[in-house]
Image (tube, rainbow, N blue to C red):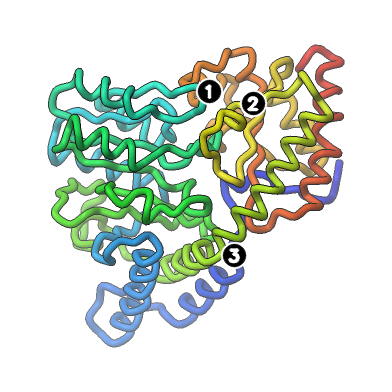
Amino acid sequence: MSDREIYLDHAASTPVRPEARDAWLSASEKHHANPTGSHRAARDARRTLDDARDLIAEAYGRPPAEVVFTSGGSEADNLAIRGVLRSRGGVAVCSAGEHHAVLEPVEYADGVAVRLSSDGRVDPDTLSDVLSGLGDVSIVSMIAVNNETGAVNDLPALAAAVHRVKPDALLHTDAVQAGGWIDVANEAADFDLISITGHKLGGPVGTGALFVRAGIELDPLLLGGGQERGRRAGTPDVAGAAAFAAAVTATRDRRTDEVGRLGSLRDELVAGLRNALEDHVTTTVLGHGAPVAAGIAHVCFPAIEAEALLFLLDQEGLRASAASSCSSGAQDPSHVLAAMGVPREVAQGSLRLSLGHTTTEADISAALAIIPPAVERLLSRGGG
């Protein structure tokens, strides 16, 4: 068992950035008061909270008043879907490749899921066809960057399809996985609700936000206070918000450079696996010609079981996921791959290797030294 950790699970959660850590320490040492109070200490805390709100809003090209702080992306997704349905009624529509935090609320409300193309994205014409066959559609949710495969949806084209067929429907995107890879401010400009979180960007776990366009009525999930303009009760986490804002700002400022650096490392990793394993490895979305997030390499080893491979990799210090981190440990193949039409015997050997701000060339070299022998070991004993 290796003492060194090769961390290639950044899509699940990435290490806290130094800027975020410094911001959290500073705010937690400075502020002990509840920012909803009226005395001076409370007003000071509220000022720090408002500064964080301003920075996050600026990074995503939205007004500060649209920011509703949450405990993370899952809460933001639930607030968007369930909040709109409770307020407006109607039907919810999402892609079949959504994170479970969107997919399950839609399914729970007897909504509709739109199939994926083989490249892992939603085709605007397919979306239009589905919407045309429905009645009162209140909300349409399309993920920005798929958390498993890294496939990047054409958000402007999807928004145009919705506006053409169901102009009264609200648009939501789960942009939790997107902030490090695409310009969400530009790509999701036509969307009414946007979910983000801190721990995918180098911020602390337990921080997130939902952008809510002015004039949209949401039925809150949490009651008991007037915080966040009545949309989310609870004492705000001032230090968490400050750290979240610092991570968002650092991610935005370095995105162009990091996309280039990590995209090259990702391509090196995939090419190395192909060279070493030839017919025993296949990529699920890379090579289709559609954009893929620079930090995600999603591959499948058709003749093996992913859980067995993850066990061997973990013994060698390599951290990765079988699909999304929420479904790792489950024996059923990814719902995303199923929605793409990937055969079950291929999907059962899926592996997500995701890179982030701490990933180095040495990590990629180590991964290429560890993964092929592990795969070959499993192949020699029948895959499991």
Which residue appears at 37% of the width and 30% of the height? 103
Find the distance from the CA under tag 2 to the CA under tag 1. 9 Å
Residue 221 left/right relative to 310: left
**Where is mark 1, residue-wise?**
337
Vertical arrangement, residue 326 with respect to residue 47, above or below: above
Find the distance from the CA under tag 1 to the CA under tag 3. 32 Å
Vertical arrangement, residue 322 with respect to residue 34, above or below: above
Which residue appears at 68% of the width and 58% of the height? 358
Asked whether disc 1 touches disc 3, contact meaning CB atoms under 8 Å apart, the reply is no
- Mark 3 surroundings within 10 Å by alpha-carbon count, few (fewer than 14), some (14 through 19), many (20 or more): many
Question: Splitting the image into 4 quarters, where does residue 9 fall?
Answer: top right
Q: Secondary structure at mark 2?
A: strand
Q: Can residue 254 be seen from the camera position used here?
A: yes
**Where is mark 2, residue-wise?**
350
For marks 1 and 3 on the same chain, the one whose residue lies earlier in the sequence: 3
Q: Can residue 110 be seen from the camera position used here?
A: no
Question: Splitting the image into 4 quarters, where does residue 68 fall?
Answer: bottom left
Asked whether disc 2 touches disc 1, contact meaning CB atoms under 8 Å apart, the reply is yes
For marks 2 and 3 on the same chain, the one whose residue lies earlier in the sequence: 3
Query: Which residue is the extreme one toward the front?
Result: 289
Vertical arrangement, residue 265 with respect to residue 26, above or below: above
Q: Can you give x and y, in whole percent of width and height, for residue 81 in the image?
A: 27, 39
Q: Mark 3: which amino acid? A: Arg
Q: Can you give x and y, in whole percent of width and height, for residue 299 in the image?
A: 66, 29
For marks 2 and 1 on the same chain, the one whose residue lies earlier in the sequence: 1
Q: Can you give x and y, in whole percent of width and height, for residue 54 in the image?
A: 34, 71
Q: Mark 2: which amino acid? A: Ser
**Where is mark 3, residue-wise?**
17
- Residue closer to the observer: 380 or 269: 269
